[in-house]
Image: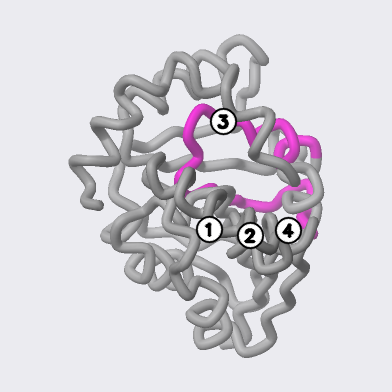
Amino acid sequence: MNGTTVQTFYRYQACIYDWTRWTILHGRKRAAARLDLHPESQVLEVGCGTGLSFQHILAQLDPHRGRLVGVDFSPQMLRQAAKRVTARGWPNVELLNCDASTMKLRREFDGIFFAYALTMIPDWIGALDRARAHLKVGGRLVVLDFGKFAGWGPLAPLMRGWLRFNHVETLRPCKERLREVFPNLEVEPWLADYNYIAVGTRSK
């Protein structure tokens, strides 16, 4: 899987994404709460897609002092996110079309959020490294993503195969890499490793 493949996939998925993913993408509100934000926090969501997580992040921010920056590789997905921002009248959201693995935003954030993105970003290791570089010391990085379905028995390979067909690579060692980057990492699996929330704090 490469960046062009992902962009092509979402070019045709963007308009139907919100209507088709609600049955499988669970836990956004719970994961966003783990960012432990303050009203004036500056937050970055990597792979923000159509902005499905925005409401859960913005609920923790003051609309005039806090700020949310959403980045995504797909212009089509960002257009849908922009429509959501306009419809909700959110004044403190900035959207950027960029590659998460090479982004250089020239600022740091109190919280960084990945929701079902690491398993789809081609250079996911690069994306994690760039995210950490944009995180303030003491800031939190929260990842919500699919697990490996460890407790699903014979259904596990079927679930992984179906997600792989949709360009989601659940067998990537994301949690292992996160532990290397954040030695204090906390991981909370849900529903027999259907998904997990990982929380890391930058110590230096």
Q: Amino acid at mark 4?
A: Leu
Residue 192, position in %: x, y?
A: 77, 62
- Report the span colored magenta: 36-59
Q: Residue at x 51, y 54 (%)?
A: 160
State the residue at coordinates (51%, 27%): 50
Query: Does residue 171 appear in the picture of this structure?
Result: yes
Q: Is residue 44 visible?
A: no
Which of the two labelled residues, at mark 1 and mark 4, occupies the earlier sequence position?
4
In this rendering, position of residue 49 left or right of residue 106: right
Is residue 3 toward the left or the right of residue 176 in the image?
Answer: left
Of all residues, the one furthest to the top in this rendering is 87
Report the coloring of the rendering: one colour
Going from N to C along the chain, the mark reached first, 4 or 2, is: 4
Disc number lying in front (1 or 3): 1
Judging by the rendered image, the residue that carries numbered circle 1 is 157
In reply to whether residue 54 is colored magenta, the answer given is: yes
Query: On residue 166, which mark appears?
Result: none
Seen at 67% across and 15% down, the residue is 88
SS for dot 1 = helix
Task: Write down the residue under mark 2.
Answer: 154
Camera-near label (1 vs 4) is 1
Q: CA distance from mark 1 to mark 4?
A: 32 Å
Q: Is residue 67 above or below residue 147?
A: above
Please give the residue where the numbered disc 3 appears in the rendered image.
51
Per the image, label 4 sits on a secondary structure element best described as loop
Q: Secondary structure at mark 3?
A: loop
**Label pair 1/2, CB-CB below 8 angstroms:** yes
Residue identified by numbered label 4: 35
Q: Secondary structure at mark 2?
A: loop
Residue 36 rendering spot, x and y as whole percentages: 79, 59
Residue drawn 56% across the image and 13% down it:
86
